[in-house]
Amino acid sequence: MKIIDIYNFLDEISPFELQENWDNSGLLLGDLNEEVDKVYLSIDVDEKLIEEMDENSLLITHHPLIFGGIKQLQFNQYPAHLIRKMVQKNISNIAMHTNFDQTHLNEYVATKVLGLEIVKKEGFIAYMKVDENFDDFARKISAAFNLPHVKCVKVHERIKTVALTTGSGASLMRSIDAECFLTGDIKYHDAMEAKTINLSMIDIGHYESEQFFGKILATYLENLGLAVIISQSKNPFTYI
C-alpha cells in the first residue's frame, strides 16, 4: 500500500488539521508515493526500534521526531543520528500527536484505563464525575498506570469532579473546572500554583499516560490488511 493511502486514512480518523500550531504532526520523513508492506507503531523513535525494523517500512509515532526547524544535521546529535539511520534503511515516519490526543487518546485513557465516564470534553480536557476520598482515588490512579509511586498536589480531602489531559498538560491548569486534574510532567512551580488556585493534581506520567497510542491505532490499521507491529519505545526514565 502507498504511504499516501495510509496517510489519508489516518487523516480521516484523526484529522491532522486538529493539531496545535506549535505541533509538527504529519509526514516527517519519506515519500507519500512509496509502497510499504509493514507498519510499526510507537510513542517515540529510538535506536533499538530502528535496528529492529525492516527496511522500507513505515513508522507511525505519537511524538514528532522533528519539532522545530532543523538548521543542521550533525549525526552525533539528537535527532539527526536517528534520522540518518532511518534514511539508510528507507524508513518513513508519520507523527500523530495533538490531533490524536483530542480524537482518541484522552477518551481511551478515561474510559478504558480508568473506567470512568466522560461527561464533558473541551479540546484536550476530558471531564469525569467521581465521588471518592482523595487518597483512595490517588492509589487507584497509581495502580491503573502501574506507577511505582504517585506524585500529588492534595488540596481536597474528597473529590467529585476530575479533569484529564494525557501527556504534559499542566499549562492548562488555569482553565480546569474541576477539583482534581490528572496529567503528566507536573513541575514544582505548577504545584505551587495549583495550591494557590485550589486545584488538586495527580501526576499520571507522560510516558505512562500515552503508552496506549499503538494499541489504539493498531485496531484501525489492521482493517487495511497491513502487517502492523506495536513496537513501543522505552520509557527514558528509570525508577529506583
Image (cartoon, rainbow, N blue to C red):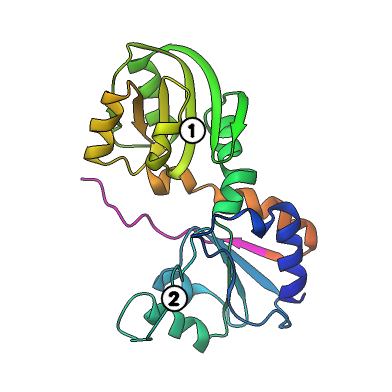
The residue depicted at 44 percent of the width and 76 percent of the height is 69
Q: Secondary structure at mark 2?
A: loop
- Which numbered dot is residue 23? none
Say whether residue 205 is left or right of residue 131: left
Q: Amino acid at mark 2?
A: Gly
Q: Quadrant of residue 202?
A: top left
Neighbor class of circle 2 (other Cα within 10 Å; few <14, some 14-19, many 20+) is: few
Q: Which residues are magenta?
A: 228-240
Neighbor class of circle 1 (other Cα within 10 Å; few <14, some 14-19, many 20+) is: many
**Measured along the vertical axis of the image, is residue 195 above or below residue 136?**
below
Residue 66 part of the magenta-drawn span: no
Of the image marks 1 and 2, the number of the one nearer the N terminus: 2
The residue depicted at 73 percent of the width and 67 percent of the height is 6
Q: In the rendering, at what x and y percent does residue 119 appear?
A: 62, 23
Along the line of sight, which residue is nearer the eye, 96 or 50? 96
Q: Amino acid at mark 1?
A: Leu
- Which numbered dot is residue 69? 2
